[in-house]
Image (cartoon, rainbow, N blue to C red):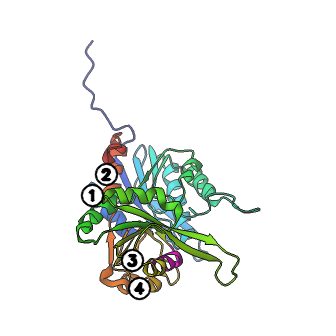
């Protein structure tokens, strides 16, 4: 008996994109890349600060992606992410992926002193308990955070967004050297150095008994009369970067280009950066930078978009194709 021809359906249904309120510009860019509309939803905050989410249409059996960065306001954005995920779960979504370009609490990844929490593990648990089946993020502060999740995920590297710009910049540099802001970033720093076929130096922080200056900094490597590409995963208050630039100049560095993935830029970080003798600040849009902060850094600021990479990863996840193949991995 001949069976009628059946069209093969996607395992988890069609792509359904949902945006939280933390980064609407990025969500719109991803939607444009995929040529898929952002799905309608209402997100309201009641006078008592409780959040309410309602979907405009059913997502039963569909492949849903919630795009939400968890930078400031951290707790509002985190709860919004969790509630969006749970809403999709309760509406019988086929699969739910939390797309979190910047994951909060990444620095709370271990018990490094008595009586402290491991909050990164708590955040991972909450995302899973809310109903996420997968997650996507960029450059976790510590690699072991991947092990905090009991669900599969794609931890993407901002390096792949930054590298084309650095390759264009390299011919303009005088005897360049890549410098990592601390020894913890040394392994990732090697990837940047190999990209432009140059040397690598490190800034080492040492704890001292001096109460007024509890941290001293030294440079391992040669930066004299060389253009420096100073790399790190994120810039928060900019304290480490300020000291790094100062010591690089003391050791005779020429032009300094600061390159980092996550522009957290809390407190007066932007003002501190603007005062530095840095030629250019190169970062990504894992976190939105307000217009007033952009204005302070002016044309020295270059923000590269992660939207095409995330869009392609979402497409491959939906179609069941390799993500590693994008990066020849």
Residue under pointer 4 = 274
Mark-to-mark CA distance, 1 and 3: 40 Å
SS at badge 1: helix
- The earlier-in-sequence mark between 2 and 4 is 4
In the rendered image, which quarter is residue 36 located in?
bottom left
Q: Nearer the viewer, mark 2 or mark 4?
A: 4
Q: CA distance from mark 3 to mark 4?
A: 18 Å
Distance from disc 1 to disc 2, alpha carbons, whole Å, reads: 8 Å
- The extreme top residue here reads 1
Distance from disc 2 to disc 3, alpha carbons, whole Å, reads 39 Å
Res. 17 image quadrant = bottom left
Do callouts 1 and 2 mark residues in contact (Cβ within 8 Å)?
Answer: yes
Quadrant where the image shows the N terminus? top left
Q: Does the magenta segment cover residue 240?
A: yes
Q: Which residue is mark 1?
A: 33
Q: How many marks?
A: 4
The residue indicated by pointer 3 is: 253
Please state the horizontal and vertical placement of residue 256, each as a whole percent of the image.
37, 76
Question: Start and end of the magenta stretch?
Answer: 236-245
- Residue 325: within the magenta? no
Q: Is residue 77 visible?
A: yes
Looking at marks 1 and 2 on the same chain, the residue that comes earlier in the sequence is marked by 1
Between residue 225 and residue 288, name the one nearer to us. Answer: 225
For label 2, count other residues whose C-alpha is less than 10 Å away and answer few (under 14), some (14-19) or many (20+). Answer: some
């Amino acid at each position: 008996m001949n069976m009628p021809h059946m069209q093969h359906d996607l395992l988890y249904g069609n792509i359904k994109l949902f945006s939280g309120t933390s980064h609407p510009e990025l969500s719109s860019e991803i939607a444009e890349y995929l040529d898929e509309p952002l799905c309608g939803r209402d997100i309201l905050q009641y006078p008592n600060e409780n959040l309410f989410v309602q979907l405009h249409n059913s997502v039963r059996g569909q492949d849903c992606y919630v795009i939400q960065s968890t930078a400031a306001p951290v707790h509002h954005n985190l709860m919004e992410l969790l509630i969006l995920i749970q809403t999709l779960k309760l509406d019988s979504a086929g699969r739910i992926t939390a797309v979190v370009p910047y994951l909060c609490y990444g620095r709370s990844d271990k018990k490094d002193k008595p009586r402290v929490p491991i909050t990164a593990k708590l955040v991972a648990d909450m995302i899973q308990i809310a109903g996420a089946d997968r997650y996507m993020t960029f450059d976790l502060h510590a690699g072991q955070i991947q092990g905090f999740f009991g669900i599969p995920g794609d931890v993407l590297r901002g390096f792949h967004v930054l590298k084309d710009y650095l390759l264009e910049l390299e011919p303009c540099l005088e005897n360049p050297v890549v410098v990592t802001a601390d020894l913890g970033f040394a392994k990732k720093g090697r990837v940047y150095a190999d990209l432009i076929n140059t040397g690598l130096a490190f800034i080492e922080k040492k704890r001292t008994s001096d109460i007024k200056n509890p941290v001293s900094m030294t440079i391992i490597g040669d930066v004299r009369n060389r253009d420096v590409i100073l790399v790190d995963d994120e810039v928060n208050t900019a304290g480490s970067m300020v000291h790094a630039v100062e010591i690089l100049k003391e050791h005779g560095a020429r032009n300094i280009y600061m390159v980092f993935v996550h522009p957290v830029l809390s407190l007066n970080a932007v003002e501190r950066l603007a005062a530095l003798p840095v030629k250019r600040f190169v970062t990504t849009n894992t976190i939105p930078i307000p217009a007033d902060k952009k204005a302070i850094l002016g044309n020295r600021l270059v923000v590269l978009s992660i939207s095409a990479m995330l869009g392609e990863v979402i497409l491959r996840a939906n179609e069941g194709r390799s993500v590693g193949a994008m990066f020849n991995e």
